Image (cartoon, rainbow, N blue to C red):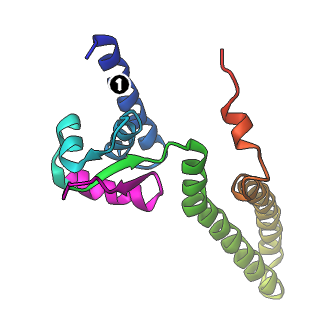
Amino acid sequence: MHESLIAVNDSTVAGLGRLARFFGFSDVMGRLYGTLLLSPTPLSLDDLASRLKISKGSVSMNMRALERWGMAKEVWMRGERKKYYMAESDLWQVIRNVLASRERREVQLALQVLSESIEKLQSAEDELTKEEKELSRFYLERMADLQAFFQVAQMALETVLGGDDTLDFEAITKMELG
């Protein structure tokens, strides 16, 4: 293979590994995804372990995680007993899968915790001293700001996750760069 192709493949795979770490995933998951994404044909666990120079056990464990996140899927290969995989090439779908699985849950949890905290402060109002009431009002102001922030985040997530008719992902994907 030409050295330019090798260099581009290596830098892209390494870059996706770094990007995965940035988003809280393992470097190995990012590199596996990148290797699959840049492969025109499905790859086996052995192929992936060999290309990335990591153990087959690590490949297997991380591939299960990639499947759970909807970033890769097992494909059947005629006459083969090994498991083969392909990357989900629709990057918007990958983003939606991750946002729906993780970020949506975290935003909802933050809103629930804030709501419970506000309720707790309001129910304790009669028992607080004057100084504590001042601090309680300060907390309530800050929590209202946090609630507003997380509600906007929730609306943004729902816009992205709402479905294909909410945003025209096809048009965005086809935009010419540079």
Quadrant (top left, top right, bottom left, bottom right) of the C terminus: top right
Range of magenta residues = 58-81
Q: Is residue 119 above or below residue 8?
A: below
* Front residue of this view, candidates 113 and 13: 13
Give the residue number, with chain letter if any, for mark 1. Answer: 9
Kind of residue at disc 1: Asn
Q: Decide whether residue 63 is among the magenta residues.
A: yes
Q: In this view, does 6 lie above or below 34?
A: above
- Horizontal arrangement in the rendering, residue 111 relative to residue 9 (left or right): right
Q: Where is residue 137 in the image (x, y as percent from the top left)?
A: 83, 68
Residue located 18% across and 59% down the image: 81
Asked where in the image residue 13 lies, by quadrant, the reply is top left
Q: Position of residue 91 (x, y in %)?
A: 56, 42
- Horizontal arrangement in the rendering, residue 96 relative to residue 83 (left or right): right
Q: Where is residue 58 in the image (x, y as percent from the top left)?
A: 22, 52
- Horizontal arrangement in the rendering, residue 72 relative to residue 103 (left or right): left
Residue located 77% across and 85% down the image: 124
Q: Where is residue 72 in the image (x, y as percent from the top left)?
A: 41, 52
Residue located 83% across and 87% down the image: 126
* Front residue of this view, candidates 152 and 120: 152
Asked where in the image residue 42 lies, by quadrant, the reply is top left
**Badge 1, how many Cα within 10 Å: few under 14, some, many 20+?**
some
* Front residue of this view, candidates 176 and 116: 176
Residue located 71% across and 75% down the image: 117
- Horizontal arrangement in the rendering, residue 102 relative to residue 33 (left or right): right
Q: In this view, does 134 lie above or below 39?
A: below
How many numbered circles are shown? 1
Quadrant (top left, top right, bottom left, bottom right) of the N terminus: top left
Q: Decide whether residue 45 is among the magenta residues.
A: no
* Front residue of this view, candidates 153 and 113: 153
Element carrying mark 1: helix
